Image: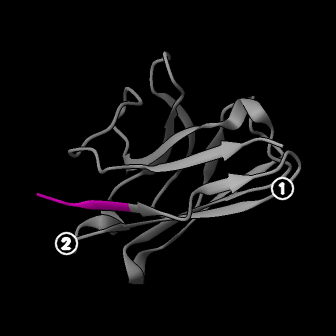
């Protein structure tokens, strides 16, 4: 089973930036579409961004133009660069391989907390 370890979260002021990382164990990482999800308190987990094996990306409308997803298949790692952060971006962020239906494929990791507040 693949294990996912997210890191890079923290407390940042509105307008600030953070870069999240997600390391996946195992050698099958490169075969999957990878995605970042987030879950705010009292809300369902939502898809934020995805990236195919060859680097094609898609973003939720709420983050388009502010977030950038990337991946390094050699390092089994996916990244999320978050700029111009807003308080509504506050959530626990998770990565996972993405199914055709948009849900996560592997067991979820512990996530990384992002808090945007002044």
Tell me, for residue 26, which label it has, or none: 2
Screen quadrant of the C terminus:
top right
Q: Earlier in the sequence, mark 1 or mark 2?
A: 1
Tell me residue 4's x, y (percent): 30, 59
Where is residue 27 drawn, in percent x and y? 22, 74
- Residue closest to the far bottom: 74
Residue 4 highlighted magenta (yes or no): yes
Which residue has dot 1 on it?
16
What stretch of residues is rendered in magenta? 1-5
Q: Residue furthest front?
A: 118
Give the alpha-carbon distance from disc 1 to disc 2, as whole Å. 33 Å
Residue located at (55% from left, 65% from top): 8
Q: Which residue is rendered at x = 19% and y = 72% of the image?
A: 26
* Depicted 64 relative to depicted 30: above or below: above
Q: Kindly tell me whether residue 89 is visible in this rendering.
A: yes
Query: Whole-percent x and y of residue 57?
Result: 62, 50
Residue 2 drawn at (x, y percent): 18, 60
The secondary element bearing badge 1 is classed as: loop
């Amino acid at each position: 089973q693949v294990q996912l370890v997210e890191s890079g979260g923290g407390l940042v002021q509105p307008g600030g930036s953070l870069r999240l990382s997600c390391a996946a164990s195992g050698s099958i990482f490169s075969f999957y579409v990878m995605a970042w999800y987030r879950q705010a308190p009292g809300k369902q987990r939502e898809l934020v961004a995805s990236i195919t094996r060859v680097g094609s990306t898609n973003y939720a409308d709420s983050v388009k133009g502010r977030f950038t997803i990337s991946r390094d298949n050699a390092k089994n790692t996916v990244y999320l660069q978050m700029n111009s952060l807003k308080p509504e971006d506050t959530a626990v962020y998770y990565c996972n391989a993405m199914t055709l239906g948009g849900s996560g494929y592997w067991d979820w990791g512990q996530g990384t907390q992002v808090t945007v507040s002044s």
